[in-house]
Image: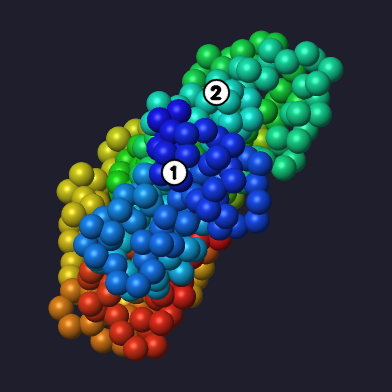
């Protein structure tokens, strides 16, 4: 209500009727919505502030209005009033664009993240800093009348499953903690579905398991922490896991093939010979597990293929565990993130970005890798090839997850981008950032 009172007072009125009929909301077509009129009032304030000479205090006010907006429609509208990213660059101090970029990433995540959409649909809770999780949504659905559950479950599986899994993978690879927390599905929820057995229970349980495998695997990929990933491979052939669980592990690894490939390419390109050997061994093992995945157990042939790929001997789960335990790789040292990405070599970064892009993997690399690539190409003298490489990374981020584009621009800082990219490449960069959809 304080926000409403602020805008009513600013329009020179003391009541909503006066506010609705004031010049403050005579900026767009008429609206009977209070939220819509507040957005229009903000838009008019921003328009008036940017018109003509813009003083330091007016720049501060424009920035504060934009970064305080929690609504994606409103913030995009305000950016539009500023004539997009180019207008923001013309009117505001470069460092202010980093704050605005961060807020754009945040509200786009809130708008587009499939998990948040389901939470808003079923729970009507919008505190994104202390959000319920996907498990709460599934528990709420079990409380629906049975006659309504069938169509809802069918719709979720047909129209939302793929987008949810893609969004969860992206959120984890971008290390968006609140979003990853919101995707949690506690084991008690999965057990409840197994117990109650609602419509399409097996499909729903498989989906929940895939969500949990997605966050688990992507978190390891972000940190180059490959040793625990062998546990996922082992679970595909472990008789203590149900067929649904084993298949969920297999399907998730299949779905994350681009994330696996992008991470392996990064290590293979920038890592030491020992790191390359380590990642090649893991890739062979994962491929053996996927190719030989057994629909039912026991499956000595499948276990034997995995053990052989690891360089061991045997076809039992015990032999597999022993082989993993005795791996020669010192994962903590060989695959340390700083060892692999601690480079300012712009030649390497350009080439890696180009190769990842040519394979269609650049968008699926972790946010940390993208930032490292951009910063390496910004370091020192930035030539046309560097600028093209930077734009390539930014374009890939935008195509994969629009919010990541603005997260990336803020992390690289607009001051560095603005001062290092020029000519046609600068025009291309502005076009990529111009305005969120």
The relative height of residue 271 versus residue 107 in the rendered view (above or below) is: below
Which one is in front, 298 or 267? 267
398 on left or right of 88: right
Residue 427 in sight here: yes
Colouring convention used in this rendered image of the protein: rainbow
Mark 1: secondary structure: loop
Residue behind mark 2? 135
**Is 286 on the left-hand or right-hand side of 374?**
right
Horizontal and vertical percent position of residue 230: 40, 39
Compared with residue 90, is residue 76 higher up or lower down, i.e. above or below? above
Image mark for residue 12: 1
Q: Is residue 245 visible?
A: no
Residue at the spot x=84%, y=17% of the render? 147
Q: CA distance from mark 2 to mark 1?
A: 48 Å
Residue 60, horizontal then vertical, whole percent: 26, 55
In front of the other: 207 or 138: 138
Sequence order check: which comes first, mark 2 or mark 1? Answer: 1
- Callout 1: few (<14), some (14-19), or many (20+) C-alpha neighbours within 10 Å? few
Residue 172 x/y as whole percent: 42, 43
- Residue for point 23% across, 52% down: 337
In the picture shown, does residue 290 fall above or below 236?
below
**Secondary structure category for the residue under label 2:** helix
Residue at image coords 36%, 81%:
426
Which quadrant of the structure image shows residue 176? Answer: top left
On the picture, is 79 further left or further right than 251? left
- Left or right of 158, for residue 402: left
């Amino acid at each position: 209500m304080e926000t409403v009172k602020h805008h009513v007072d600013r329009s020179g009125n003391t009541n909503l009727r006066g506010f609705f009929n004031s010049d403050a909301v005579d900026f767009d077509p008429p609206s009977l919505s209070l939220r819509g009129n507040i957005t229009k009032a903000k838009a008019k304030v921003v328009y008036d502030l940017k018109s003509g000479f813009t003083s330091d205090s007016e720049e501060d006010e424009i920035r504060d209005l934009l970064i305080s907006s929690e609504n994606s429609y409103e913030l995009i509208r305000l950016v539009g009033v500023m004539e997009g990213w180019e207008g923001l660059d013309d009117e505001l101090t470069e460092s202010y664009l980093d704050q605005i970029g961060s807020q754009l990433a945040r509200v786009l995540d809130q708008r587009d993240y499939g998990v948040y959409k389901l939470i808003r649909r079923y729970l009507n809770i919008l505190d994104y800093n202390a959000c319920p999780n996907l498990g709460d949504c599934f528990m709420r659905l079990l409380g629906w009348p049975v006659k309504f559950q069938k169509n809802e479950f069918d719709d979720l599986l047909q129209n939302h499953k793929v987008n949810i899994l893609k969004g969860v993978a992206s959120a984890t690879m971008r290390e968006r903690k609140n979003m990853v927390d919101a995707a949690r599905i506690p084991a008690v929820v999965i057990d409840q579905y197994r117990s109650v057995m609602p419509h399409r229970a097996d499909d729903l349980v498989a989906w929940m398991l895939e969500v949990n495998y997605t966050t688990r695997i992507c978190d390891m990929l972000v940190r180059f922490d490959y040793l625990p990933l062998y546990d996922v491979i082992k679970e595909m052939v472990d008789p203590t896991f149900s067929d649904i669980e084993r298949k969920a592990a297999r399907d998730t690894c299949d779905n994350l093939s681009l994330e696996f490939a992008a991470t392996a390419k990064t290590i293979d390109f920038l890592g030491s010979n020992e790191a390359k050997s380590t990642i090649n061994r893991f890739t062979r093992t994962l491929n053996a597990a996927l190719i030989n995945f057994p629909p039912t157990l026991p499956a000595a042939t499948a276990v034997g293929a995995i053990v052989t790929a690891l360089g061991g001997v045997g076809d039992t789960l015990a032999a597999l565990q022993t082989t993993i335990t005795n791996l020669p790789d010192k994962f903590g040292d060989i695959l340390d993130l700083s060892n692999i990405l601690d480079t300012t070599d712009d030649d390497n970064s350009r080439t890696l970005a180009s190769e990842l892009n040519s394979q269609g993997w650049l968008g699926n690399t972790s946010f940390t890798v993208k930032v490292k690539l951009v910063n390496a190409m910004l370091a020192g003298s930035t030539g046309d090839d560097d600028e093209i490489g930077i734009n390539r990374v930014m374009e890939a981020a935008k195509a994969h997850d629009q919010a990541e584009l603005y997260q990336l621009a803020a992390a690289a800082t607009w001051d560095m981008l603005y001062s290092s990219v020029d000519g046609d490449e600068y025009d291309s960069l502005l076009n990529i950032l111009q305005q969120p959809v």
